[in-house]
Amino acid sequence: MEIETLLSPHKSAMRALVEAIIAEQGLHAGFYWPKDLLGAEMATAEAVGVFEDGQLAGFVLYRELPTAWEISLVATHPQFRRRRLMEALLKHLIAAKGQEKELWLEVHIENVAAQKLYEKLGFRLSGRRPRYYKDGATALLYSCP
Ligand SMILES: CC(C)(COP(=O)(O)OP(=O)(O)OC[C@H]1O[C@@H](n2cnc3c(N)ncnc32)[C@H](O)[C@@H]1OP(=O)(O)O)[C@@H](O)C(=O)NCCC(=O)NCCS
């Protein structure tokens, strides 16, 4: 397993990974990343990825804000799930942000797998946004000190 900053040459692999997730579970409210939105986010966000045998297995998009790093996308390729690769990648980000900043993200209330991941890593529920998603569902806000 290797963790690397992702740059422009990695964008096609990031797109393919997101397409594999959409092929698996559909383009639903809790993972709403159509091509245009993904392209716009990749153009402006920071990206870090985890590789297995040279293949991009997972990645995170995030923004470095003055008081926190805010994660917008967390994705592991369906073929690489449950190998603790995203756990390793998020631990890397938690260490990289430094102690003076928090890490923030939001998650669809029905995405239990992601919630378990964040809670395992020490994220705490910091708020809720009712009717946040296109399907009317609540967003759970998590922060990691
Ligand atoms: C959520 C997601 C990123 C997890 O990635 P992953 O690489 O499979 O996760 P890891 O193997 O690193 O899991 C680490 C921990 O997270 C939790 N976890 C991960 N997937 C889980 C699942 N399906 N059910 C329950 N807990 C889960 C477990 O606590 C696990 O620790 P354990 O191995 O000791 O049980 C992945 O399922 C995914 O990409 N889903 C689709 C996209 C998505 O929902 N992104 C998040 C939107 S906010």
Image (tube, rainbow, N blue to C red):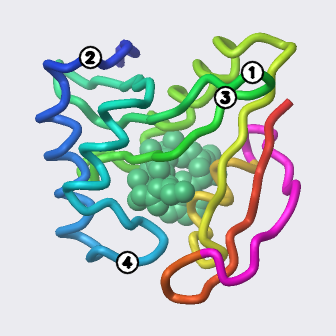
Describe the element under mark 4 as helix, strand or loop. Answer: loop
Residue at the disc numbered 1: 66
Query: How far, Cα to Cα, is label 3 from label 1?
Result: 8 Å
Q: Name the amino acid type tagged 1.
A: Pro
Q: Position of residue 117 (x, y in %)?
A: 63, 50
Circle 3 packing at 10 Å, graded few (<14), some (14-19), many (20+), is many
* Residue in the foreground of this view, choosing between 122 and 70: 70
Does the stretch in magenta take in 91? no
Relative horizontal placement of residue 67, taking residue 11 as reference (left or right):
right
- Which label is found at residue 28? 4
Mark 2 and 1 residues: CB-CB less than 8 Å, in contact? Answer: no
Describe the element under mark 3 as helix, strand or loop. Answer: strand
Describe the element under mark 1 as helix, strand or loop. Answer: loop
* Residue in the foreground of this view, choosing between 62 and 25: 62
**In the rendered structure, which disc, 1 or 4, sits on the residue that comes first in sequence?**
4
Q: Name the amino acid type tagged 3.
A: Trp
Tag nearer the camera, 3 or 1: 1
Circle 1 packing at 10 Å, graded few (<14), some (14-19), many (20+), is few
Mark 4 and 3 residues: CB-CB less than 8 Å, in contact? Answer: no
Relative horizontal placement of residue 8, taking residue 139 as reference (left or right):
left
**In the rendered structure, which disc, 4 or 3, sits on the residue that comes first in sequence?**
4
Q: Which residues are magenta?
A: 120-132
Up/down of 95 relative to 132, above or below: above
Farthest bottom residue?
136
